[in-house]
Image (cartoon, rainbow, N blue to C red):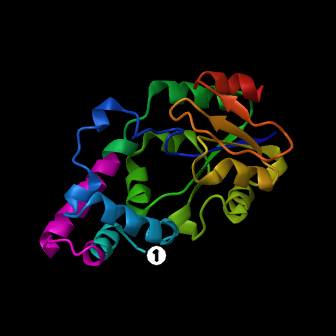
Amino acid sequence: MKAVFFDLFETLITEKTRKDFQARAPFHERLGTTEDKSLLWWEENEDAAMIGKFPDCLARFTDMCIAVESPLTKNEIIMAAQEHEVWKSKVLGQVEPQIFEMLRAVRACGLKVGIISNALPEEVLAWQFCPLQDHVDPVVFSCSVGVMKPDREIFELACSRMCVQPSEAYFVGDGGYDELRGAASVGMRAIQAAWYQDRDVEWSCTSPLVRANSIRDLPKLLW
């Protein structure tokens, strides 16, 4: 084995489980709509957003506000988008020390490290503030390459950029977007990262799904 690719959100960075990130007003309230309307818009537009249909946060917020008939003015939508971009920079700027320790241990195993993430433009923009930059090699963001997990193409593209075969690489993720099955479908060895989100993952592959229940468990599993 030559490489390990990680999912980013809820694997190397967590927003949903950090208590100090829970004080914000709900997303739908910030855009002047109801939770049902915002969820319906997201269900209809999530895939398009993740593969780059909207060039930036403002374009996506504007489209949503028009669709849900939000009372926000143009300037208020601009302010909401700017605030959201600042927030994402804060999220990506905070990485737990244990993650860095784990990545150093993975590299000590002689493995290259990459990231494959479904991400929105504001998250790609915020990546410049992320201290993980110096600890990973190729980073493949869905909205930058026009394809998202679990599509096998995004995994194949990441392996190609790393100059490894899928059979020579691990993929580690919490299991969102059916990413573990997607990775396994191209021949990567999938490991569920259960340290931030303990998801129930449907698994139909012949080999059992390996779980890392804590950040410190992962290097041992790779050995």
Let me know if residue 164 appears in the view: no
Q: Amino acid at mark 1?
A: Lys
Q: Nearer the viewer, residue 194 or 116?
A: 194
Residue 131 x, y percent position in the rendering: 44, 40
Residue at x 75% of width, y 29% of height: 222
| Figure check: 192 above or below 127 | above
Q: Main secondary structure of the magenta part?
A: helix
Residue 206 x, y percent position in the rendering: 86, 43
* Local SS, label 1: loop
Q: Nearer the viewer, residue 168 or 74?
A: 74
Q: Nearer the viewer, residue 5 or 151?
A: 151
| Residue 90 quadrant | top left
Residue at x 16% of width, y 75% of height: 74
What's the magenta region? 65-89
| Residue 66 quadrant | bottom left
| Left or right placement of residue 46 versus residue 102 in this view | left
Residue 67 x, y percent position in the rendering: 30, 77
Residue 71 magenta: yes
- The residue identified by callout 1 is 53
Q: Residue furthest front?
A: 36
Let me know if residue 179 appears in the view: yes
Residue at x 29% of width, y 69% of height: 61
Residue 24 x, y percent position in the rendering: 23, 44
Residue 181 magenta: no
Q: Say how many tags the image has.
A: 1
Residue at x 52% of width, y 67% of height: 144
- The quadrant the C terminus occupies is top right
